[in-house]
Amino acid sequence: MSHRILFVCLGNICRSPAAEGVFRALMPNARTDSAGTAGWHVGKPPYGPMQAAAAARGIDLSDLRARQFSAGDFTRFDLILGMDAENLAEIEALRPAGNTTPVRLFTEFALETGATHVPDPYYTRDFDGALDLIEAASAGLARHLGQ
Ligand code: 4NP
């Protein structure tokens, strides 16, 4: 089965592109994308400090470009993963009537970390801490999907 997985955060320049980059390296056959609930950074590459922190782990984010989450994403993807509870609320607010696509917190796939969300490194400046969580959740998601 081919998996279509969308990672969502607020700006689509830190957490969700990092999640896409880490996860696609683990599961190259999955179809992946990322989006932001806000449209502020549409068309921009991932934030420089996040690109640098990811590159230090061998993860290249340079081809990714920000876009805004939209209601059509509910039918383009099999699983939508938000980085925090605010992301989930913004996603659910756009769910089309009758749509049942699962929308989950990415950290549900990293229960061993005890994290309830991926803190936003744009504000915390902890890019490595965010990447640690994203790597743990990506590994858990890959296991969940049977890879
Ligand atoms: P992200 O981080 O949601 O992980 O991409 C943010 C990036 C930019 C802004 C907020 C969050 N911003 O306010 O511009």
Image (cartoon, grey):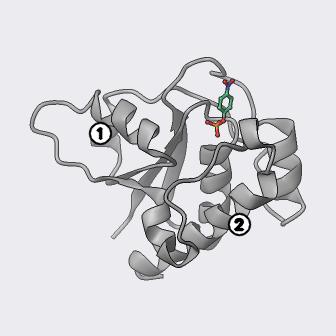
Q: Residue furthest top?
A: 40
Residue occupied by mark 2: 132
> In this rendering, would 115 be left or right of 41?
left
Can you tell which mark lies on residue 38?
none
Identify the element where label 1 is drawn.
Answer: helix
**Alpha-carbon neighbours of circle 1 within 10 Å: few (<14), some, or many (≥20)?**
many
Q: Between residues 70 and 83, which one lies in front from this camera angle?
A: 83
Task: State the image coordinates of residue 142 (x, y, percent, origin top left).
Answer: 49, 75
What amino acid is found at the position of numbered circle 2 in the picture? Asp
Residue 106 visible in image:
yes
Give the vertical position of 13 relative to 115 (above or below).
Answer: above
In the rendered image, the quadrant that contains the N terminus is bottom left
Seen at 79% across and 51% down, the residue is 126
What amino acid is found at the position of numbered circle 1 in the picture? Phe
Task: State the image coordinates of residue 8 (x, y, percent, origin top left).
Answer: 50, 42
**Alpha-carbon neighbours of circle 2 within 10 Å: few (<14), some, or many (≥20)?**
few
Which of pointers 1 and 2 lies earlier in the amino acid sequence?
A: 1
Seen at 47% across and 74% down, the residue is 111
Give the vertical position of 111 relative to 124 (above or below).
Answer: below
Identify the element where label 2 is drawn.
Answer: helix
Q: Is mark 1 within 8 Å of ligand 1?
A: no
Residue occupied by mark 1: 74
Q: Nearer the viewer, mark 1 or mark 2?
A: 2
Residue 60 visible in image:
no
> In this rendering, would 20 be left or right of 143?
right
* Disc 1/disc 2 C-alpha distance (Å): 28 Å
> Which quadrant contains ligand 1?
top right
Q: Between residues 139 and 2, which one lies in front from this camera angle?
A: 139
> In this rendering, would 97 be left or right of 75?
left
